[in-house]
Image (cartoon, rainbow, N blue to C red):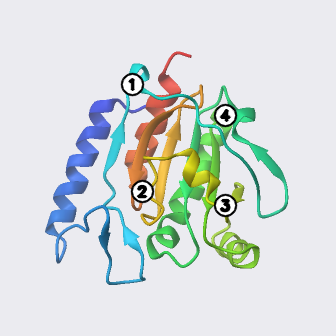
Amino acid sequence: MRRRSAVAVAIAAVLTLLLSACAPGGATGAGSDSADGGYVAGDGTFATWAPDERAAPISLVGTTYTGEKLDLADWRGDVVVVNFWYAACPPCRAEAPDLRAIYEDYSPDGVKMLGVNPRDDAGTAQAFERTFEVPYPSLHDADARGVAAFEGLVPLQAMPTTVVLDRQGRVSARILGQIDPTILRGLIDDALAEEI
């Protein structure tokens, strides 16, 4: 059974923090400069919001790299995972296979996934998507409308960032930095288990 309780997510988070503390140089803090890749990295920490603490539904309309118009409001009623990324970001590349596997496992349950890329032109983004066999769409967010829609939740310089939206389109959880797939799966399971 894939459903994980909030306790399992918390245990996984503690284990992740303990393991990262053992890594050479310790964990990279959210918002601190990385010496590798010229990006500002999050540390993989996550935050959750109870249903009564969540802000209004996210409103975002944009165009995918294939030229299709996408309105996040059309996905209301489904749990949505939004991943902010760009092609030259080392942790974005590292987490791409995990995100693909999560999409493949959860799309039969109605979970939607969307990438948002505020940096790359179409050629660069599509090359990344081909290389990593990304099966879900990404918005070409050159004007940073996607980042603005998640104001206060997605630091433009901290890539990747992954957000889980509940069935009403509200932010239920956020991961700063490269995802731990076990934690993201737990956050998705929690969102799926909620009453509408």
At horizontal 68% and vertical 72% (from top left) the residue drawn is: 125
> Which numbered marker is on residue 53?
1
At horizontal 46% and vertical 56% (from top left) the residue drawn is: 161
Q: What amino acid does circle 2 point to?
A: Ile
Q: Left or right? Give the position of 106 relative to 65.
A: left
Q: Mark 2 or 1, which is nearer the eye?
A: 1
Whole-angstrom CA distance, mark 1 to mark 4, is 24 Å
Q: Examine the rendering and report whether any part of residue 169 can be seen.
A: yes
N-terminal-most mark, 1 or 4: 1
x and y percent of residue 107 in the render? 66, 41
Whole-angstrom CA distance, mark 2 to mark 1, is 23 Å
N-terminal-most mark, 2 or 3: 3
Q: Residues within 10 Å of mark 1 (few under 14, many from 20)?
A: few
x and y percent of residue 95 in the render? 48, 64
Q: Mark 1 or 4, which is nearer the eye?
A: 1
Q: Which residue is mark 3?
A: 141
Q: Which residue is mark 4?
A: 110
> Which numbered marker is on residue 179?
2
